[in-house]
Every structure is written in C-alpha cells, then in structure tokens.
Image (spheres, grey):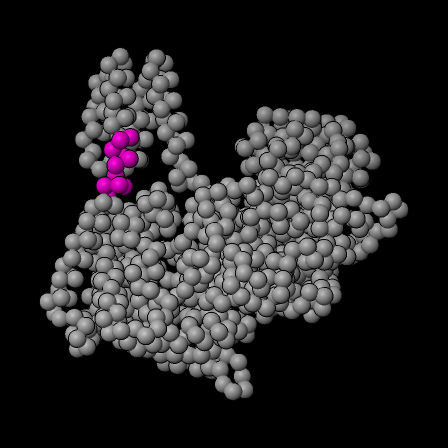
Amino acid sequence: MTTPETKEALTFEDFKTEVLNDYKIAMTSRECSLLGRREVLTGKAKFGIFGDGKEVPQLAMAKAFQNGDFRSGYYRDQTFMMAIGQLTIQQFFAGLYGHTDLNHDPMSGGRQMGGHFATHSLDEKGNWNDLTKQKNSSADISPTAGQMPRLLGLAQASKIYRNVSELSKKNKFSENGNEIAWGTIGNASTSEGLFFETINAAGVLQVPMVMSVWDDEYGISVHARYQTTKENISEILKGFQRDDKNKGYEIMTVLGWDYAALVGTYQRAAQIAREEHVPVLIHVNELTQPQGHSTSGSHERYKNEARLAWEAEYDCLAQMRLWMMANNIATADEIEEIDNQTKKEVLEGKKAAWTAFVEPFKKEQNELVTLLENIASTSVNRVFIQKYANDLKEIKEPIRKDILTIARKVLRMIVGEKSQTQLASWIKNYIETIQPKFSSHLFSESAQQVMTVKEVLPTYNEGNEAVDARLVLRDNFDAIFSKHPEVLIFGEDSGNIGDVNQGLEGLQEKYGELRVADAGIREATILGQGIGMAMRGLRPIAEIQYLDYLLYAIQIMSDDLATLQYRTKGRQKAPLIIRTRGHRLEGIWHSGSPMGMIINAVRGIHVLVPRNMIKAAGFYNTLLKTDEPALIVECLNGYRLKENMPTNLGEFTTPIGVVETIKKGTDITIVSYGSTLRLVEQAAKELLEVGIDCEIIDVQSLLPFDVNHDIKKSLMQTNRLLVVDEDVPGGAAAFILQQIIEIQNGYDYLDSKPQTLSAQPHRPAYGTDGDYFSKPSVEDIYEKVYAMLHEVNPKEYPNLY
C-alpha cells in the first residue's frame, strides 16, 4: 500500500518497491474501470462512471494525504481511495452492483451509484470515531461542483481548531489544525458558480485547502473552449496568486502523466497548506478519459482521430510504464507480469462481489418458491400459483422486486383461503426486513436524535419586566457560547454589528472574530462552511440573512446536507443549525414564505418555525443536545415585540415535532405557525364576539410534524379544520393538510370540508397595502371561519356578502 507520509533516506530499492506498488494500485484501478464498464453493458450493473485516465495524479495526492485529512471530491477518485486503503476491488464492484450491505459497499450501502466515496466518521451507533487516526473522505454527491461548499467548511475547521484556544488541544477531530481538506473536480465543472464562490471564499478565509482540477479538456462531450475562458482555469485564476503584499492562493500546474513531477508537486502543496494554512490550487493538465464520460456513451463520437491517438500515447499509465523502464525500475516483462496478475485479481474480486450480491436473493427466492408450492397444493388456483412458483424458480439471477412482485400477485389469488394469512405474514415480514435497507437513516437513529430531548420550560423571576424579544435571543446565544466552545456562528452582518436585528449584539467582541464572524454575500458557501465544520465535530450556526435568500443555498441543503445521513447509511453526520428570518415584510424579495418548496426539498433536515423568540431560543438549546441538522426561521417582525426574559438561558428547550395549543376552543381548530399566528389570535378574539370559539394550534415544527397527533385530538372536539398559511396556495398548507387528514386520520372527525387559507399565488407586493392584499389578513381569517360556520348554522351566522 502506498504510504502517504514522506519517508526519510529512501534507498533505491525502497523507492523501486514503492513505485511498483503504486503502479500495481493504478493498474488495479484501471482494470476495475474496464471490467466495470463491461458489467454495465452486460446488464449486471445499471450505470458506471469511472476514474480511468486519472490514476497517476491520484497516487501522488494519496502520498501527501495524512491521517486526519479530509477529501471532498469528484466521482472519479477511485484510485485515490484504493491508494489510501479505503477501497478494495470487491468493494468497488459491490458499489457498482448497489449492494445494500455496508459490509460489502461501505461507501453507501447501495444508495449511491459507484464512484461516490465515503469513509466512516461514525460507528454503528452513530458516535464519532477518532477522525485524527484515520484518513477521511466526505461522502460524494453527483451534482457537479456540489462538493465545493462543503470543502470550504472542512478546511475552515482546521483553522478554528488551531486558533480557538479552548479547542486547540488534541481531540477526536484535530491535532492543532494540522489537517488539510483536499478537493477534486473535473475541469468542466469549474464553470459552475459553486466552484468560483468557494475559490473566492477560501482565499478570503485563508484555510488549508488543496484543490485539484483534473483536466482532460472535455466536459462529457463539450470541449474546454466552450467551458473556460482561455481554455485554462489556472490561467484565469492567476489573480488569486498570493504575493509579498497580498494573501491569496499558491497556484501550481503539472502534467497529469508525469509521475515524478506529480509527487513533488503534491508534497510541496501539502507542506504549504498544512503549515501556513494557505489554500493551493493544482491544475493537473493533459489527462485522458479512455472510456469517455460514462457507460451511457462513447467518446469516439466527439473526439477526432488525432485526439484519440494522442490520448493513447499520453495515457498516464502508458507514460508511467515508459518512465519506469527508462529509470530501471522495471523491465517490460516485469510490467507485463504485474499487469497479468492484476487482471486476474480484479476478475476474482469482481466474481466474489457478484456472488456476495446475489446470494441473499437466491436464498429468499428459494424460500418463497417453497412457500408458494405448499400454498398451491391446497388452493383452488393451484395451477396458476404453481406457474408463478415455476416462473420464479427459473429466474437465474433474481432481484428482490421479482420476488416480492410474485408474492403479492399470488396473495390476490388466495383471498379467503387458509393460506392467505401465512403468505400475508411472509410478505409483511419481508417488507419490514428489506425496506430499511433502502429507507433507513433519513434522520439520525442514534441516542442523540431529536426525540430523545426532553422539554425544559423557561423559568422567570417574579415581577420580571418584558424586554425586546431580540434580547432574549442575544442573551441565550451568550449563554450558549459561554457553555459550548465548539459553537460558532457566521453570516452576512453576523459579526461586527451583531446581525441585522441585533440578536448577536456585542458577542463578537466577547467571543472573537472566529466564533462570531461576518461572511461575504455568498449563501451557498455559508451553508458549505457549516456542513464541513459540522462534519468535523464543531457545532456551527450558519446564518442566511433572509428566508428568500435561502434559495441560493437550497441545492446544497437538498443534495448534500439533507441526504448525508441517508447516503452514508448513518456513518457520517453534520449537525448544522441554519438560522434565518422571514415572514410579513413588504416586497417581493424580502417577505416570501416559500415553505412548501423548502420542506419538500430538504427531507432529512428539521424545519422549525417558532412564533416568538422564546420558542426560537428553545429550539437552539434543543438542537445543541442532538446530532441532527435543522433550519430555524425566526419571525422577522417579532424582534421588537416584548417578551419576558427567562432565568434559565441556554437550558430551556422547545420540543421538536410537538405542537402547542395556544387557545382552547370548541367550534373550529385553526392551525398555523410563525408570524401569522398573531393575526389568527386577533381574528379569534373578534370571532368570539359573535359566539365563534376557535381553538388555535401552533405547529412550531413542520419537519417533523405533530408526532403526538395532538391536532387530531383537537378535531375530535371541534370537528372543523382551517389551516392558515402565508405560503402560496398548495404550499406548506397542503403538506399540513395531508399530514392531518391522511397521516393522522383527522378526516374521521370532521363535520365540514377541511379548508386552507393561504397567500396569493404571487410574491408580496411592496406598496403600503401590498402585505394586506398579498397575504392573509385578520379580516380574511375572520371571514373564512365565519363562512365555514355559516355552512353549519346559516341562521346563526347569516351571509356576510
């Protein structure tokens, strides 16, 4: 195995051994790519995207990669993973087949296509491993450049650990911030905005990041001339090069087929980043992609004969062979012997992976065949059932869909027969056993998940005077920062001025610029900072100034953060808290409430919508006791309202997934959240004057939603339901209604049609009356409820219009 640590006084024999070992790893990777493509084209695997052509630079990167370091990369880094000892031949093919067992596919347990790599930061119970004693890879995602924001946070964590005195001692996550975050990306994907945003942010923050660009001149079939100005990413990034007067990057270029130059380049880059905390960009030129982009096409369609001939000559493995022979490291015969042995080992590993993959299916197939044959012997439909059993038996390589489909079809044939219960029980047990292989770990399943946190009510001094609500947040954050040195917060205007609503007033001066920090106007990488730092044991709070600006970061939230536990089957986590504010302000861009879009994009992240700052502060306190990510939306028009100051700051908790009944009533249940509740409360007061008694329930938490089904209990008393929301029609209100009617079976207790009252389908207008005519008003709520009661008792509540 390649040893990443630099060796001293290396003899020629040692050097020769190491080079030959490197070549063996590269050749193993190449053979995996070639055989992997054939597995897809023969139908055993569904899709393949491989790292052929990128092997040699990845060997060099692996040599400089040390324990504690993190990779955030590109889906062609299989050689690197093999070189650091984190990917075997059998695991490579298990990933290609989508094996659902982590023991076979430790990267994702079949949840991601091959080429997406991860190491285990957590043990089987969800507890942190000692990340300083292992080589780490954050779990890849397919969206191009989507790995970049997270890379920034992984690198920034080292800066925090080195410079925050309470954290600088050795722990499970860092040794004095000496760890590098290594990024990789294809040259075409540097066209993405996320790449440029991250590059700029890393230069500003001066974090230990080494960014490799694998340049083979194409993005799928599109040449670099259509991708990059001057067709050269390092050329156009020259302005980022540091000099005597300005901080910036160290930028290096190297040929991707030059083994010796690559090793030297990566060693120099690692030393600069590790010791000086300076970001380094390595542009690796003249790489090839021998099989094209993926198994979905052929590169002969878009590369001319001259290019194909050049690629054959300058393939990095071909050039490495020539270099080895020229430097008396190996003869042509010795290289051929390595090649032949490697091909044999890859073939054997492939066969072992396939056997391990299909063996459970065949066992389950035989079990069902036996059961169906027994059922057929006593059934009036024996001929048809026996045919199904025979059809199943004849499938040489069944999948679980084949097995379960036949079982469910047979069940329809034996309704009312004695064997129905037996087969129905088998099907239920089968689904209960198999479904979690595909569906577990959307949220944490550890002892630190949110449902384990008990509610702690705020306590108050007698005669306590009410204060501006923002002071509750500020003082609660103060308590959090004094108690938890691993907590830090950052965002636009979060530092010097203490955020736009003064919820962090004075805290930067008290806790320093690293823990309470300003950030540039770059929402996606603010999220990325949080994800990366949370993956390394810190407890970041990433602040997005307004809810509408969250859209810049929604892709990162959806594709990276929300899927992290799921796509690693519980072996990585990022308990990031996202702080933002929204609701009830004027103007298209500053008062949206796109909650429907958010909650349907970020399953895997808790979405919390507190109605006031006491509730918001309680959510922050709760989340810091858990290991799960969440979004908290503070009410924008609530900062200047008056609230009592609790005496147990930093300690009281708001339960997640639990609704609160803020007014009892008998005639109708009104469900809402956030700022809109204040309108609902006012409307309820006015409705009481005409004898309509409303029960008001604050959702508090959209994800998860009312885990105790308290809204259903309310409907059992009132028998009517109105959901009030300032999202667009069909937005969050539709989700709430689905949860109440379908999940809670609230329909059973309704005497009237359940209804929603939402905003207009457009964004709120800016004009003085824009809010009134764009979103539900007190009068809208009053008249909606009144009309629902008119339907019940038209004599008591005659038509208003």
Q: Which residues are magenta?
A: 354-364
The answer to whether residue 69 is left or right of residue 348 is right
Q: Position of residue 128 (x, y in %)?
A: 50, 50
Count of number-bearing discs: 0
User: Quick check: 341 above or below 406?
Assistant: below
- The residue shown at (25%, 45%) is 353
Task: Answer left or right for 107 relative to 773.
Answer: left
Give above or below for 544 relative to 447: below
Residue 67 percent coordinates (x, y): 42, 61
Q: Eyeballing the image, is 660 above or below 536?
A: above
Q: Name which quarter of the figure residue 280 lies in.
A: bottom left
Residue ranking furthest to the right: 463
Looking at the picture, tell me which residue is in the foreground, 126 or 749: 126
Q: Residue at x 10, y 67 (%)?
A: 333
Visible residue check, residue 145: no
Residue 302 at x, y percent in the picture: 23, 68
Task: State the residue in front, 729 or 582.
Answer: 582
Question: Does residue 41 belong to the magenta stretch?
Answer: no
Instruction: Give the residue drawn at x 36%, y 70%.
Output: 6
Asked whether residue 358 is drawn in magenta, I would say: yes
In this orientation, does residue 159 appear?
yes
Residue 452 location, quadrant: top right
Predominant secondary structure, magenta span: helix
* Residue 745, image x, y percentages: 56, 29
> In which quadrant of the rendered image does the C terminus lie?
top right
Farthest residue, direction left: 333
Quarter of the figure that contains the N terminus:
bottom left
Q: Residue at x 34, y 51 (%)?
A: 113
